[in-house]
Image (cartoon, rainbow, N blue to C red):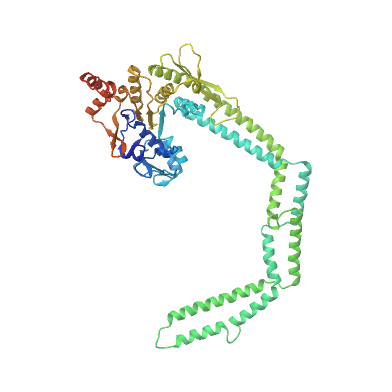
Amino acid sequence: MLQSLYIENFVLIDQLEIDFHPRMSVFTGETGAGKSIIIGALSLALGNRADTQAIGPFAEQAEIIAAFDVTQNPPASSWLKQQDLMPNEDGELIIRRTTNKQGRSKQWINGKPTPSGMVKELSQFLVQIHGQHDQIRLLNNHNQLQILDQSADHPLLLKQVQEAVKQVHELEQQKQQLLAAGSMSHEQAQLLQYQYDELEQLALQEKEYDELHEALKTASHAQELITTIDASLNSISETDGSVEAQLGLVINQLQQAKGHDFSDIIKMLDEALINTNEAQLELKAVAEGIDSDPAHLTQIEQRLDQITHIARKQKVMPELLYQHHQDLASTLNTHADLASNQQKLEQQIISASEHYQEVAEKLSKQRQQAATKLAQDITGMIRDLGLPEADFSIQVSHKKDTKPSASGINHVEFMIAANKGQSPQPLNKTASGGELSRISLAIEVCTQQKQQHQAFVFDEVDTGIGGGTAEKVGHIMQQLSAHNQVFAVTHLPQVAGHAHDHLLVSKSTQGEYTTSKISHLTESQRIEELARMSGGQTITAATLAQAKEFLKTGS
C-alpha cells in the first residue's frame, strides 16, 4: 500500500508530506483547489512522463517521494528481487523522482538510480489509476484476457498451456537448426566430404600449429641457445670463480666471522645458492630438450608448410584449421542423420501440438464458463451504478492466428449494450468516459483477489451521477478497500462518506503565490465538509443532519 507521499514544488504545492490510511481515503475540496494534483504527483513518481509546466514557482525543480509497504504484495516483491532492488527489512519501498524546468528528470528506487521505464513497469504491481480519460488498460484486448483469467482463477491450466507452447517452440527451433545445418546440395556435401577427408589425412592435432611455431623458434636458434646455456652453466658452477663457488666462499667467511651475528644474511645467501642450483638444473633440462639436428628443423618447416597449404586451400586461418575439421565432422554427421532426425522431430512436433491444442481447448472452455459468470456479475453491478439498461458481455472466440501462443487460442472482447434494444458493441467503440469509469470500478470489485493488495486510485469517476447511484459507488469503493487500498477524488458527499480517511484540499494566497494544502479531517470537520458538498456554502442544521447520515465508515 501507499504509506506516504512527499511533494515539493509541484503545481500549487510548495512542500507537503502526507500519510495515508490503509483502506479508503477521499480527497475533496472546492473546484480548482488542486484535488487532482495529488494524483498527478503520484503518477509522476510512478514513471509517467514529466511535464515542465507542472513544476511550481517555488524552486528550480519538483521532487516527489512515494513510500510503499510491499510486504503483502508478492508480484511487486518478486519484481524488486529480480531487479536486485529489494526493500529494507520492514518491506518499505521508496520511489523518488525529480524533474527540473529544463526537462531533465531523475528517478530512484530504494536509493538506486533507475530508468523511468523500469519504474513504470513496477508501478503496475503497486497502483492502478482510473480516471475519466484513463481507461487504456480496460480497452486493450490482451488486458481484457488477463482480467478474465484473473476472475476465472485457473493458474494450473495457464501454466500447462505455457509449458506446452514452450515445448512446441523448442522442437520447432531444433527443426530449423537441423534444416539449416543440413540444408545443402549434393555438390556441397561432396565438397565438404573432400575437405574433411583431406583434413583426416593431415591428422592435425589440437594446438599442434601453435606448438610447431614454438618448436620452430627453438630449432631455428638451437646452436645459439646451446652455446648460451653452456656459457651460463660455466658461469654458475663449472669454473673456479663461478657464482656457486663465490656464494659458498662468502657463506663460509660469514660463518667464521666473530663479533656480529650474520645468520639472517647467511640464510638469504643459502636461499640464493639453492636458487642457483635449481637454475642450473633447469638450464641443463632445456639444453637436453634442444634438438640441433638440421633435419629436425627441416621436418618442422615441412609440417608447417603442409598445414598452411591446406588452410589456404580451404580458405581457413591455419590456427583455426583444427576447429574447422571438427565443424566439418559435425556438419557431415548432421547432414547424414538429417532425414532420420527430421522425421523424428516432425512426429514430436505433431504430438506436442496436439497436446497444446488439448490443454488450450480445456482453458478455452474454462474461460467461456468464467466469462458468463463475470459478465453477469459486472452487468448487475453497473446497473446499480446508474446504467439500469446496460448489458455487459464477454465474447470468447478462437483467434484467427492458429500459431501456438502462451495465452492460448482465445481472443477476448469486452462488449456493452448501454441501452435496451441495442446490440452489444466492443467496449472501445461505444462506451463513454463516464461509463468506462463505472465499468472499470465494477470490474475491479468483481475480479479482486484477497491476496492482491494493490492501491486503486479513482479520479472523479463519479462525474455525472448522483443520489442513490452515488451511494452505491461509495459502497462499492469501500467494499474494494476490504483487501486493497482505495483513493478517490470526488465531489459527491455520498461517496466521501464511505471513506475511512477524509482529506480536504484547500487553496490560499500567500504573498505573490497561490498554494494548495491538504489536511486530514476530524469527524466534526468531515460533517461540515460533507454538508458543504451537499448544500453549498450556506450550512444549515438540515444539511448537517444529512451530512451525518452520509458517514458510513463502519463497514
Drawn side of residue 346 relative to residue 465, left or right: right
Please state which of residues 226 and 488 is positioned toward the viewer in this rendering. Answer: 488
Find residue 401 and report its image quarter: top right
Image quarter of the N terminus: top left
Drawn side of residue 153 relative to residue 28, left or right: right
Image quarter of the C terminus: top left
Please state which of residues 518 and 327 is positioned toward the viewer in this rendering. Answer: 518
Q: Position of residue 299 (x, y in %)?
A: 75, 66
Q: Position of residue 36 (x, y in %)?
A: 36, 31
Q: Is residue 229 above or below residue 500?
A: below
Drawn side of residue 180 relative to residue 65, left or right: right
Q: Position of residue 389 (x, y in %)?
A: 43, 13
Q: Is residue 450 visible?
A: no
Q: Is residue 461 visible?
A: yes
Q: Is residue 339 above or below residue 258?
A: above
Q: Position of residue 91 (x, y in %)?
A: 36, 41
Please state which of residues 69 and 535 is positioned toward the viewer in this rendering. Answer: 535
Find residue 37 and report its image quarter: top left
The residue sitting at the front extreme is: 512
